[in-house]
Image: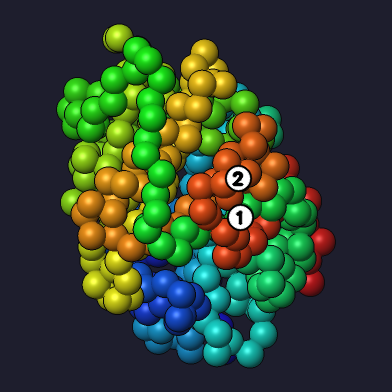
Amino acid sequence: MIDVVRGYQAEDFGPLRDLINAAAAPDRTMTDSALREFLDYPWFRPETDLFVAPVDGGAALAAARDVRVWARGDEIEPILESWGATHPGARDNAAARAVFRAALARAGEIVRERGARRGILQARCNRDDRRSIEILESMGLRPARVLLTILRPTLDHLKPAQFPPGITVRPYGVGRDEEAWVRAFNEAFADHWGGFMGMSLELWSRYVRRRWFKPEISLVAWDKAEIAGFGHFVINDEQNALSGRKRSLMRYIGVRPRWRGIKLGVALTRAGLIACRNLGMDSCISGVDSENVTGAHRIYEREGFVTMKQHVLYRAEVPLTLAVS
């Protein structure tokens, strides 16, 4: 039985970790350090922006749902992202709906606090997750885009990376490259559908100082003093140890418009995969928009990636008028 929905408190840390692991099993393992990083996000305050539904007044959680400012954070119409988890043992969706209502109310407050008249709220779920789909649609969100999780199951037989003339590639320089990299990122993804592929300098400056950030697999392609593109890869040793895998993540491949059409993205993809293999990885996972304007998913298919999962990005305008029982 759900007694109350309330804001996150410090003592919820362990129960929240356990809820996430229960909801995602067996595909994902949330560690303490990963959860701390998840909660450490610009403009996000867990005590006001994350809601939990305890079970029978105890420590265990039946559901949780947050809302946070996404993208660059300075958009005229704020883009908000909501993440949530429901314990698989919950008999119905009552707890999930309750925390979602609280998150929606908070989304409206955030939009008003930013002086905007409207905003966009988005949430994601697996295309086959009927429970999450029912919850999202009952809250007034509607499917807007299909996002793909892709995998290169082996890092064998990689093709050499051939960079265009005049392009110099070097590892990311922490404390040196942040401002130029963020400008390049936002230009590279300016035409991405939905406007949510924006990056703030504050977020990126925190990100590059995470314990798992490895400059040697975050490659930056320079044309003299300008960044032409970047290939940012991640190896999370803690997650790999827990899962028993040697898997890397291709997080961002971006090319600024002036340098498109010269196969720079292909070269950065190959160079990053080679760098990950050189660090002992044997596979690589990534995510891509199924309708990317640059045709990125087709490029990745030619480079040996296959589609593992499909996720649906749901969206709604904030504030919402709800008619939920």
Residue visible at 62% across and 32% down in the picture:
294
For residue 297, the mark is 2
Depth-wise, is mark 2 or mark 1 nearer the camera? 2
Q: Split into 4 quadrants, where in the image is the C terminus?
A: bottom right
Q: Position of residue 175 (x, y in %)?
A: 18, 27
Q: CA distance from mark 2 to mark 1?
A: 8 Å
Q: Position of residue 317 (x, y in %)?
A: 72, 42
Q: Split into 4 quadrants, where in the image is the N terminus?
A: bottom right
Residue visible at 45% across and 81% down in the picture:
26
Which SS class for mark 1? strand
Q: Position of residue 286 (x, y in %)?
A: 48, 53
21 with respect to 66 (left or right): left
* Label 2 vs 1, first from the N-terminus: 1
Amino acid residing under circle 1 = Leu
Residue linked to disc 1: 148
- Count of all numbered marks drawn on residues in the image: 2
265 with respect to 214 (left or right): right
Can you say whether 312 is above or below 230 in the image? Answer: below
For residue 63, the mark is none
242 with respect to 88 (left or right): left
Mark 2 closeness class: few <14, some 14–19, many ≥20 residues within 10 Å:
many
Residue visible at 40% across and 54% down in the picture:
157
Q: Quadrant of residue 58?
A: bottom left
Instruction: Tell me whether circle 2 and circle 1 mark residues in contact (CB < 8 Å).
Output: yes
Amino acid residing under circle 2 = His
Residue visible at 32% across and 71% down in the picture:
245
Q: Residue furthest top?
A: 224
Mark 1 closeness class: few <14, some 14–19, many ≥20 residues within 10 Å:
many
Q: Position of residue 73 (x, y in %)?
A: 48, 32
**Front-lying residue, 265 or 119:** 265
